[in-house]
Amino acid sequence: MKGIILLISCFMVFIQVNAQILHPDDEASNIHFTIKNFGINTVGTLKGLQGEMIVNAQDCTKDYFNVTVEAATVNTGITARDHHLRSSDYFDVKKFPKLQFTSTNIYNNTADGMCWVTGKLVIKGISKTINFPFKVEPTSIGYRLQGQFTVNRLDFGVGSSSWVLANTVLVQLNVLAVK
């Protein structure tokens, strides 16, 4: 029994030395999305970023992300459109107040030299697996993580089929993770 406790203690020290539990700094982070509406790029943001992140500066395969963002913060710069996006037609923020991403696997891709994360994206209670590259840069107060991915909004029940609104949404992440 003493051997197991010693082993667990050594493992916890190893984790603490090589990885850090961090939290996203919402004010210093940006979550942008782009979707074509009538053939024109429409851009917006989401805020209210919260959660926990483990960042290992030496080995990104040991990283972990479990973060949420507030659906009601959707902002395209047009108040009427933002209210419609918050309605049950799109994000249904009263019933589903948060969007969530939880990593399930992170690996180094030798073909492009990038770290790739696979995880579950949950929007409106619908969970889908996504996979995308990201990079980590140390800062004076933590780490800057950047990546981007595309999703089909219809896979998550966000809106309905439309000839004026594209199905594919580009999401760009620029997250500052701090202690």
Image (cartoon, rainbow, N blue to C red):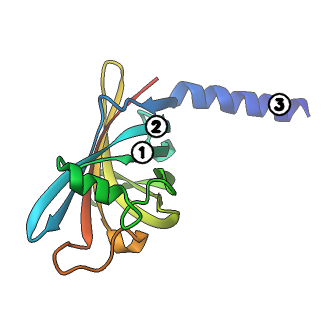
Q: Could you tell me how far apart the alpha carbons at marks 1 and 3 are, in whole angstroms?
A: 37 Å
Q: Residue at x 59, y 31 (%)?
A: 15
Q: Could you tell me how far apart the alpha carbons at marks 1 and 2 are, in whole angstroms?
A: 6 Å
Q: Considering only vertical position in the picture, is 73 above or below 11?
A: below
**Mark nearer the viewer, 1 or 3:** 1
Mark 1 residue type: Val
Q: Can residue 76 be spotted in the picture?
A: yes
Q: Considering only vertical position in the picture, is 173 above or below 19?
A: below
Residue nearest the viewer, comparing 90 with 47: 90
Are circles 3 and 2 on residues that touch, CB within 8 Å? no
Image coords of residue 154 (percent x, y)? 35, 74
Determine whether the residue tagged by mark 1 lies in a helix, strand or loop: strand
In the image, farthest residue toward the top: 140
Q: Could you tell me how far apart the alpha carbons at marks 3 and 2 are, in whole angstroms?
A: 33 Å
Kindly identify which residue carries mark 1.
69
Residue nearest the viewer, comparing 79 with 77: 79
Asked where in the image residue 118 lies, by quadrant, the reply is bottom left
Kindly identify which residue carries mark 3.
5
Residue nearest the viewer, comparing 34 with 148: 34
Q: Is residue 99 left or right of residue 152?
A: right
Q: Residue at x 41, y 64 (%)?
A: 88
